[in-house]
Amino acid sequence: MGDLEEPKMTNMPKQLVELFKMAVASMDDRFGSDLGDDSVEAELHKWLNGDDPLPWKDPLHVTADEWFFITTLYGEMTLDGQRTHIRRFFRPLFVEAARRDVTNFVPELPEYKGLRSAWMKGRLCRMGQVLRDRGMSMSAYVEHLHALESGATPENPMPALDAIVRDHRATGWKTLSVFVRDCVLGNCFPIDSRAEAELRSHGLCPDERLLVSLSLSLGRNPRQVARMFYAAGGQ
């Protein structure tokens, strides 16, 4: 799913579209065609592995279960903090306790102890419960979200993200948005403090649905645009 050839939105305020267009042009000057969808698995492996690779199921790919676990543990930390946190829990909690399967996340696992935020345990358990209730694997759930995303319209630009937010009854969904961006490859624009700072520096509001619509109005892939703003905010 690359950049779109035709704009999907025609009713955005012209001044706002122009402001966003200029901001995206500045991102293009800095990052070019980098930060697209094709390299996300390799970049995740590179970032987390270092000199001591994690015990991935496949060293060249990332499973849907791995994506959900890892993005849930991103949480409220610096990049170094995120990496340390994920590496600390990947083997004991994900590989050994859950046996690489999100459906095995249940509240009584003792290996949750030490997670940075209490909501992370709740998020993992809720996803496990949703999958068990529906008799689905994580990969099947991702296919379900893919199918919903194929019905995206200008009036409903983020059906996959909206669906997973509903399933989790989430009032905060940054990490769910990251999951949809990198695993589901759906329309979304995750906003953390880095992306927000960069957006505000261009006079833009950190409103995810608006930013997705603005990206589509320019015929751009909102995932790539979001990654550029995130990367720029860290420089």
Image (cartoon, rainbow, N blue to C red):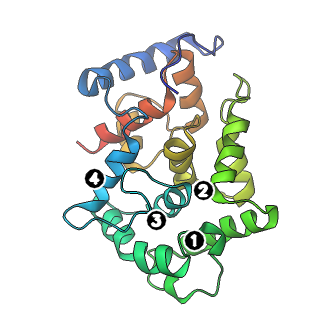
228 vs 207, nearest the viewer: 228
**Alpha carbon separation for disc pair 4 and 2:** 28 Å
The residue labelled by disc 3 is: 73
**Labels 2 and 3: the sequence-earlier one:** 3
**What residue type is disc 2 on?**
Gly
- Determine the secondary structure under disc 1: helix
The number of discs equals 4
Q: CA distance from mark 1 to mark 4?
A: 27 Å
Q: Nearer the viewer, mark 3 or mark 1?
A: 3
Residue under label 1, please give it: 119
Q: Which mark is residue 202?
A: none
Q: CA distance from mark 2 to mark 1?
A: 10 Å
Q: Nearer the viewer, residue 43 or 124?
A: 43
Amino acid at the residue labelled 4: Lys
Q: Closer to the camera: disc 4 or disc 2? A: 4
Closest to the camera, between mark 4 and mark 3, is: 4
Determine the residue positioned at 57% across, 53% down: 176
Proximity of marks 2 and 1: CB atoms separated by less than 8 Å: yes
Residue ID for mark 4 = 46
Q: Residue 124 at x, y = what percent?
A: 60, 69
- Kindly identify the residue that appears in the image at 53 percent across and 69 percent down: 100
Q: Residue at x 39, y 68 (%)?
A: 86
Label whose residue precedes the other's in the sequence (4 or 2): 4
Which numbered tag is attached to residue 172?
2
